[in-house]
Amino acid sequence: MTYLDQKVRIIAFLELVFGCGKDDRNLAFRTIAETCNVETGDVEFLVMKAMSLELVKGTIDEVDQTVQVDWIMPRYLNKDHLNVLASRMKEWESKMEGVIKMLETKADELLH
């Protein structure tokens, strides 16, 4: 694999991770292999390379053939990335409104 091929596959991996929700970053080797156009046996090397470059942080589970990504390096965001982030912010806002309403309801119960 050439240096350029490796860079392209790492970028594909980063795009895959970025497209996942923060709580949904447990990726199967098979998914990574298909997305990055590598053999399943080469997934661990690809992920380790991304980790060594400090582009992502997480854990590799060779037995279960999964990668758990806990952090991805912030980088230049294009319009599509910004749309994804805006959508996630709206989802977060809705969840927080639900939590606030629940707390207000429970607070009334506790006060009375």
Image: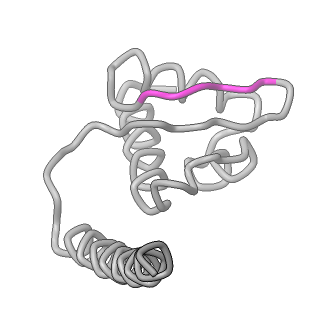
**Looking at the picture, how far across and down is residue 29, in whole percent?**
72, 41
Q: Please provide percent x and percent y for residue 67.
A: 64, 36
Residue 83 lies, in percent from the top left, at 24, 78
- Majority secondary structure in the magenta region: strand
Asked if residue 32 is positioned above or below residue 84 in the image, the reply reads above
- Picture colour scheme: one colour
Q: Quadrant of residue 98?
A: bottom left
Task: Answer above or below: position of 84 versus 94.
Answer: above
User: Is 79 displayed left or right of 99 in the figure?
Assistant: left
Q: Nearer the viewer, residue 72 or 45?
A: 72
Q: Which residue does the image show at 33% across and 19% down from the upper left?
A: 53
Residue 34 appears left or right of 46: right
- Residue 72 vs residue 94, the one in the foreground: 94
Q: Is residue 85 above or below residue 36?
A: below
* Residue pictured at 23% horizontal, 76% vertical: 86
Residue 102 included in the magenta stretch of the image? no
Q: Check if residue 61 falls in the magenta segment.
A: yes
Residue visible at 60% across and 25% down?
A: 59
- Name the foreground residue: 70 vs 40: 70
Q: Which residues are magenta?
A: 57-62
66 in relation to 24, above or below: above
Q: How many marks?
A: 0
The residue positioned farthest toward the top in the image shown: 52
User: Which residue extends farthest front?
Assistant: 112
Q: Position of residue 89 (x, y in %)?
A: 27, 73
User: Closest to the observer: 76 or 57?
Assistant: 57
Furthest toward the right, the residue is 63
Write the residue at 42% across / 82% down.
108
